[in-house]
Image (cartoon, rainbow, N blue to C red):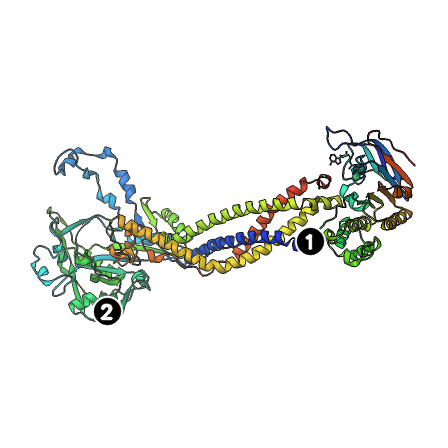
Amino acid sequence: MSVLKLDKVSYKYNQNTPAVLEDISLEFENGHIYAIVGRSGAGKTTLLSILSSLAAPTTGHIYLNDEDVAKIDKYKFRSRYVGVIFQNFNLLPHLTALENVVLSMNISGKKFEEKEKTLAMALLEKVGLSGEEANRRVLQLSGGQQQRVAIARALSYDPDIILADEPTGNLDVETQQEIIGIFRMLAEEGKCVIIVTHSPDVAKTADFVYELKKSEEKIQAV
Amino acid sequence: MYIFKNAIKSITRNKLRNILLGIIVMVIAVSACVALSIRQAAAVAKEDAAENMTITAQISFDRSKAMEEMAAPEGEEPGQASQESEGSEGNVPDRGRFDFDILQGSSLTLEEYLRYAEAQQEGDSYYYSGAFSLDATGELLPYGTEEEESETEDQTDETGQDLFAGGMEGGRMEMPGDMPGGMGGKRFQVNQGDFSITGYSSYNAMVDMFGSDGGYTITDGEMFEEDSEEYACVISNELAMYNDLAVGDELVLCNPECEEETYTFTVCGIYENESASSQENNRFAINDPANNIYISYPAAAAIIAASEEAANTTTDSSGEETSAALKNTLAFTYTFVNEEHYETFAEKVYDLGLDEDYTVSSMDIEAFESSMTPLETLSKTALWFFVIVLIVGGIILVTLNIFNLRERKYEVGVLTAIGMKKAKVAVQFIFELFLVTFAAIIIGGGAGAAVSVPVTNSLLESQIEDAEQEQSQLNENFGFEHGGKGSGGEAAGGEIPGGRGGAVPGQGRGQDRFSGQSAASQYVSSVTTATNAVVILQLAGVGLLLTVISGLAALISIMRYEPLKILSSRT
Ligand SMILES: Nc1ncnc2c1ncn2[C@@H]1O[C@H](COP(=O)(O)OP(=O)(O)OP(=O)(O)O)[C@@H](O)[C@H]1O
Ligand SMILES: [Mg+2]
């Protein structure tokens, strides 16, 4: 059974611009890593926006466990079911790395076995940030460090679906491997990991690769 | 809730923005606190004054009403008009239609006054006085007159009247009914007499004179007993000295219309009157306060009764014989514990049979109101100030908030993108505003409270100065040499016979030229407390209002933001 299903989804940013996505039908299942590839401007980020309920499809439907996402409260969907690693991170720059992570945990409204701070700290360590860095304002972190904060934040509330937009774009090969390892672990735990990437290395590690093509809307499974 | 924690963190993170916001709110708070304190002080002062005020009221004949009724030209009889004509026939005033008996109104009797007193309520009271004039006999001389003059008198006994230049025949003087004390008497056509005798029903009636502000003190002997019918009197020290009278001496006075009708008084006390300045226009001895003689009302009533019994008659210039009995001018004063009782009385008294031509009026309420004028003007100004401060402050706050929100747009975008409900974002932002606003309100309110009393008092002082200046300007413009130059402190009543220091309390007050306002010294001139619980509550309301106004701006913008748009349009 697919956890996420796109049914003939089209999307236009504006009424009078051409559709960015047209008639896309895709299925994602738990326990797998999906890579979405495509040239710049192909609509990968747009697709993730739709998958994370930041944008509603212009036509078509998205189903979460066979339930129409349009019927689910989008804030609840975003804060609990999907963890998004944005291409440009979308962290709060004046908060510390730790505060950013804790904030997401708070917003999710989920109950945690340990104190949010402790869990967040552990998670930040797992993605490779030191305690000192974790307590630094995001503004004062490097791009790669910010990316890791964004990853930690997306994982912090234990969502079923991970949506990652170029999650390793700013990372060295070694850290990239570590992050991929984390994603693999999550997939083994039964989560659905969807990664948008330009990197063939990352794409290679995925169980499925979907390619978005700009106008021909052709999707290939590898 | 995490949003409140986050709000506090957010405030400390954005110090500069919040300090700016705080300063603006603080300025509003200080201004609002001062303005509200002024209003509160005014209200408190008014309440206090109202509580301490004893209201006195009189019933008087509404002459303007009667005049209106009389003015109807249909009633005009040409024959009558020409009878009085003195010169050209063209423009002769039609005096014939003036019916003085009606214009005067029939004087209310003591019984009537007492009946109307039933409209009073618990705690209310009344007092009254009767006034008439008597002449000196024998060696006795009214203060201010000289012996030769009294000896040159022939047909009349009018000592003082001789000083008056012409225009009077037979020592008689016509006075319209509105002379001081003209509350009830018939149209005056009486000999003036040397002394004004006033009988008081109670000491309360004399509080105006012998009270703390009255300026009268018994310096020798004591006051007569208020319910005694004995002819015991108190006289002025001037009169006593002038005639070498002492306590215990006898004083023989007679009916001005009939020398044989004499009354013997015993001097029981001699008073000194500080407020009796030399009054330039005392042409008649009777007008000099020094010739005021005070007795108890029962004594006065006894004299009137005796005089009526004697039934002496006098022949006037037209040969008509009229009664020479002394005429009592009754002055009746009702006192009330509060304004409400007075208002009730003023309504109910008509149910008890008072004619509609009479009005109930209280100088105290007018005086009270005018004493409140500066404070009330200040209070009104303060209200405007407050409103303007709120409007201007509100506009500034909203503008500032709109700018702040633009800055925080990205924050809103991120928060909503990661699933925070817009409403929660709004609550957090508004809570931040609330905290900053209230901290600023508390500080500003504290500062405002500290300065409000001195500020109120100095503003009040300048307000009173303005009012006084206006008053003296007014007096000057009207040609009244009021209080001399610069000595605005003196009450105007002093120069008008029958004013506050006059013989019959409560009657002369209406003579103040500008209805009580001239009593400059009676303005409420200072307040002691300004900021109280009410002001604090109002300030809290102001804080809430400011939070709501600026919060509304936040709410509207947050609701309009769409995370995808914000985040994708970010550079
Ligand atoms: N907010 C927007 N309004 C209008 N058009 C947009 C908006 N965001 C993206 N687009 C357009 O939609 C198309 C897809 O953009 P998208 O960001 O999804 O591409 P992408 O595949 O993620 O590219 P990249 O690999 O460079 O990130 C592009 O042509 C882009 O110009
Ligand atoms: Mg993209």
**Three-letter residue code for mark 2:** Cys
**Ligand 2, what quadrant?**
top right
Residue placed at 54% from the left, 57% from the top?
Answer: B445
Q: Using the numbered discs, state the Cα–Cα distance from disc 1 to disc 2 in whole angstroms.
A: 83 Å
Q: Which mark is residue B52?
A: none
Q: Earlier in the sequence, mark 1 or mark 2?
A: 1
What is the x, y in percent for residue A49? Answer: 78, 39
Residue placed at 49% from the left, 46% from the top?
Answer: B388
**Three-letter residue code for mark 1:** Phe
Q: Is residue B458 visible?
A: yes
Q: Which mark is residue B268?
A: 2
What is the x, y in percent for residue B396? Answer: 55, 46
Could you tell whether B322 is left or right of A182 in the image? left
Chain letter of disc 2?
B
Could you tell whether B407 is left or right of B486 in the image? right
Report whether the residue tagged 1 is closer than 8 Å to ligand 1.
no
**Nearer to us in this view, B152 or A208:** A208
**Nearer to us in this view, B199 or B426:** B426
Q: Are marks 1 and 2 on the same chain?
A: yes
Q: Nearer the viewer, mark 1 or mark 2?
A: 1
Report whether the residue tagged 2 is closer than 8 Å to ligand 1.
no
- Mark 2, Cα crowd under 10 Å, few <14 / some 14-19 / many 20+, is many
Image quadrant in which the N terminus of chain A is located: top right
Local SS, label 1: helix
Where residue A27 sits, quadrant-wise, is top right
The residue at which mark 1 appears reads as B4
- Mark 1, Cα crowd under 10 Å, few <14 / some 14-19 / many 20+, is some
